[in-house]
Image (spheres, rainbow, N blue to C red):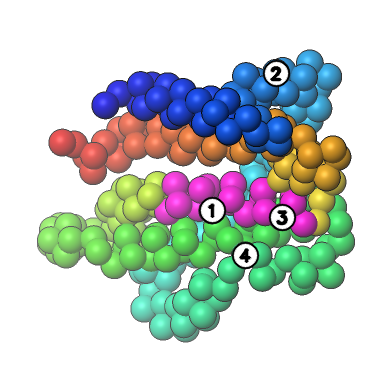
Amino acid sequence: MPPLLVMALVIGFWWWTVARTESAIFPTPWAVVTGTLELAEDGTLWEHIGASLFRVGVGFGLAVAVAVPLGLWMGWVGGAYRTLNPIFQMLRPISPIAWIPLAILWFGMDDISPIFLIFISSVFPMIVQTTNGVHTIERRYLRAAANFGVSRAVLFRQVVIPAVLPEIIVGMRIGIGVAWLVVVAAEMIALRSGLGFLIMDSRNAGNRYDLVIASMIIIGLIGLLLDGITRLLERLKTVKWRYVR
């Protein structure tokens, strides 16, 4: 069933349910639309979206800059893997939300706290994915290169990195999804701007559930957009071979 048809059915069912129950609190789809337009017209919506995207951009960018080279190194050098992997595997299951009290203690109630949370939540999935990508390279590629007398540095640059790029992109898709989830949670608790804060502020300022639902939908749409942007990397010539069907 086409996605647009499914969405239309969901909206129709939502509208019918609210009308039938005559709910005085839960908004109709049209109330959500008008609430969104209200925020857009006074500029509040764009300020909150910009704040959330800024935090995700900085935190996720730092995570990529650290995770990719570190994951390649751990995958390529056995000693680095044996030393660091247990530490990362211990830290990785810790919920990013559990870091919020420490983030506030260390960095205060400003943008650095959510940026740290985004970094800590997205760096580990990318490290693990990149490392596993190096470990799962088919040995025949490496043996073929060795037969031609290729040096270890050239082998790493021209064989290992291109072979592991698809796994890096998978890690980035996971990381950006987690980062977007974490920034909203952090904004609900510790900040006074961003889409997470907008949800809590709308709830507390007169039970504006139309704005709560609008914020939730916008969060979902931006998450879909971020994933789509990351998937565009799959079209790069250096990784197209991995996605041939």
The image's mark for residue 34 is 2
Residue receiving disc 3: 186
Which quadrant of the figure has residue 154?
bottom left
The secondary structure making up most of the magenta span is helix
Image quarter in which the N terminus is found: top left
The answer to whether one can see residue 33 in this image is: yes
Callout 4 touching callout 1 (CB < 8 Å):
yes
Name which residue type carries label 2: Thr
Seen in the picture, residue 157 relative to 101 is either above or below; the reply is above
The answer for how far apart the CA atoms under marks 3 and 2 are is 27 Å
Name which residue type carries label 3: Ala
Range of residues picked out in magenta:
171-189
Q: Residues within 10 Å of mark 2 (few under 14, many from 20)?
A: some
Image quarter in which the C terminus is found: top left
Callout 3 touching callout 2 (CB < 8 Å):
no
Q: Nearer the viewer, residue 182 or 32?
A: 32
Q: Residues within 10 Å of mark 4 (few under 14, many from 20)?
A: many
Identified at 58% across, 55% down, the residue is: 63
Residue receiving disc 1: 178
Callout 3 touching callout 4 (CB < 8 Å):
no
Which quadrant of the figure has residue 48?
top right
* Residue 194 horizontal/vertical position (percent): 75, 41
On the rendered structure, is 152 left or right of 198? left
Residue receiving disc 4: 96
Callout 1 touching callout 3 (CB < 8 Å):
no
Q: Residues within 10 Å of mark 3 (few under 14, many from 20)?
A: many
